[in-house]
Image (spheres, grey):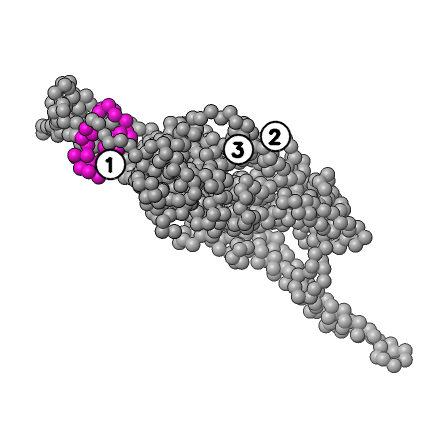
Amino acid sequence: MTAQPPLPVAMVAAAVPVGLAVSLVEGVDGGEVYIRGQLTFSWDAPDVAARRWAAVTLAGMRAASVTKVAAAFSVSVGTLWMWGQLLAEGGVAALAPEKRGPKAPSRLSGDVVARIVELRATGMSQQAVGDAVGVSEFSVRRALKTAATQNSAAPRNTQAHQDAPELSGPVPARGTVAVQPELPVLPTPVPRTGERSAARAGLLAEAAPMFAPAARVPHAGLFLALPALETTGLLTCSKDVFGALPDGFYGLNSILIDAVVRALAGESRTEGATRFNPQNLGRVLGLDRAPEVKTIRRRINELAQTGKAQELIAALAKHHLTATGPGGEDLAAILYVDGNVRAYQGTKRIGKLYSTRLKFPVPATEETWVTDAHGSPVFVVMAEPGASLAGELRNLLPELRKAVGDDRRVLVGFDRGGWSPALFKHMDENGFDVLTWRKGTTPDIGEELFTEVTRTDEHGEEKTWSVADTLVDLALPTTKKTGEMYQIRQLSRIVPAKGKGGGTRQIHILTTDKELPAGEAVWRMGNRWRQENQFRYARMHFDLDSHDSYASSDDDDKRLVPNPAKKKSYQKVLTAKKHHAEVAADVDAALTALRTAPAGAKELKVVVTSTMHNTITKPLWKAEKALIEAEKAHKKIPAKIMLGKLSPGQQVLDTEVKLIHTGIRMAAYNTAMTIAREIRTNTGYAKASNEAHALMRQAFDQSGDIDPTEPGHLTIRLDPLPTRAKTDAIAELCQHLTATKTRYPGTNQILRYEVKDKTSSRNN
């Protein structure tokens, strides 16, 4: 069968290709555009409007990328976008160049400009100022811009200017006027059709972020998170671990930034992408639209197929603990470790775990989390099904040492789930100090040993406790054979007793650090609740317990697991022991009564025959025989059994996809904590101690302008918040974030942040 050959791109040999399907021919007589060899547009040399209309239409029909169309017509992308706006507003006639010749004299004389600046400084709106002096609002903006340019160009040789500190960011003070360029309100995003076509053909590694001027952009407040996101190391660590995603329109940075900003906006799960307008979120990413659910899942699965998710978590932990900057060097001084049970509600056969939060066993997977001194997540591993915290801690120590990066001793805090004297000794020998609660019944410490200790926390508040500082010996598992004991430091406190009875009781803290001040140890142990707060906050705002992937695989049938029959048989042994003790007490009482003379009787000889003795002790022999049989049966039952015999067909959930999403959520959580800390420490917001997180989320949801007009900078100008206090607080935050001189990832544009002035208008 014959096949028709494809048409040439152009019918003219001198045509210049524009993309894969378009060619342009232009000379002194005019120009022509060919699409797939067919003449589509043509114009004569004097017809400038027709030429511009052809360029705009060609870009609009996505026959070639905007960048290539602009280059072919020898204009910038901004000029091509401006032609499109003129065409939309005034038709083809608006594309004709303005007629040259004399114009009317400008109304913006020096006196008028001075009057405009004077009225604007009083707080009047730009429209009200224009009405007062008889010019348009656009003329008012132009006059203010001209005045600001003249002021900035004037020499600064006065003593006031010499003494004034130079701000790191362009945040206007109260009472000043922020001159704002005129930006189009929510223009249609510039299509990236050519790049998408190249990506489908495998010719594009990833689309670079490009920002077009736009005003009133939803979610513009999410740009505030980028300086804090950079400190988490998510982008750099991901690049080091994964390198890059396979060629495509959405690259590694785009996928990760999209996931983080969605999490900060309250939609951590991939399905949350459906709750955003892709064009609006795309403006934050510097793209024509954000990736949608199917694309996100495909790109995350491509990362998961490398099998390097745990390497990413380790890299994030090392970055967090070794590159925290000034004041963060003590984050690794103490690490808190705890497990989190993630319940599963699906239909697959998943092993059950006891959930302390739900108070009953449920099908679930368990994660072992490590947080720093502030309670921020550092490291996480997927625990083996049924593994104890003590066993997970022992396996975790080498990874923690790599994350810390040196040989210093690290204090590791955990709850009673990690109780194991052998583990305490092992950690001490490997450069880790233990901080945990003592488990089991313990004799009280004499009250004469208690003294008051104090500790001042990071907020300057002094805490006081009554503590007894002693040393205790713990029996190691080999005690029965060798009699070995392990000595450890014990800090005891007197606290109110549980229940309604009142009174007091003693609780005991154990630590292998004998140099740590007692007040410091008590305070650090109490701070383990920061980890619980992290779990609670992450469940509420970052979907900590979501599964992200329901893919599963068969569990190892040969894996040894605790034998439930062993536990049941031990309960029978305990029951037999209890019954034996009760029968022994009854027999002793019966024999004592048999040998005892009645009250008031004189010397009475009591005769106890073998038959009488055997009759009385017969129940005891029976109980003893039952106990021996129960112990023998218990001994024969193996302590562990292969999983295949106990629960054939059991499955385990996928971990790679979950760990990648967990790393993203860790970065989002730490980003949020950094911004909230900035609000508390670097703004004058009076309610920051209680409302820092609420203000942060409100700022993330704020609309604003994206202004890339100044070369080398990307200015984000947020709309005012509902109250002056919140607006001023975010303005101060913007000043501090601008001082970081953070570059938008993948570009050379430095981020600058501003907040618009909330001025009065004629109607308000």
- Going 43% across and 26% down the picture, which residue do you hit? 153
Residue 27 highlighted magenta (yes or no): no
- Nearer to us in this view, 546 or 45: 45
Hey, what amino acid is under mark 2?
Answer: Asp
Which residue is under mark 1?
A: 85
- Nearer to us in this view, 435 or 382: 435
| Magenta region | 71-99
Q: Position of residue 107 (x, y in %)?
A: 30, 34
* Disc number placed over residue 726 in the picture, else none: none
Q: Position of residue 1 (x, y in %)?
A: 9, 29
Q: Is residue 122 left or right of residue 405?
A: left
Give the SS element for disc 2: loop
The image quadrant of residue 88 is top left
Q: Position of residue 189 (x, y in %)?
A: 29, 37
Hey, what amino acid is under mark 3?
Answer: His
Give the residue at the far right of this rendering: 602
Q: Is residue 615 left or right of residue 643?
A: right
How far is disc 3 from disc 1 in space, using C-alphas?
Answer: 46 Å
* Disc number placed over residue 406 in the picture, else none: 2
Hey, what amino acid is under mark 1?
Answer: Gln
Crowding near pointer 3: few (<14 within 10 Å), some, many (20+)?
many
- Going 82% across and 73% down the picture, which residue do you hit? 595
The image quadrant of residue 47 is top left
Asked whether residue 548 appears in the rendered view, the answer is no
Give the SS element for disc 1: helix
Crowding near pointer 1: few (<14 within 10 Å), some, many (20+)?
some
- Contact between labelled residues 1 and 2, with CB atoms less than 8 Å apart: no
- Going 12% across and 20% down the picture, which residue do you hit? 29
How far is disc 2 from disc 3 in space, using C-alphas?
Answer: 13 Å
Which residue is under mark 3?
A: 319
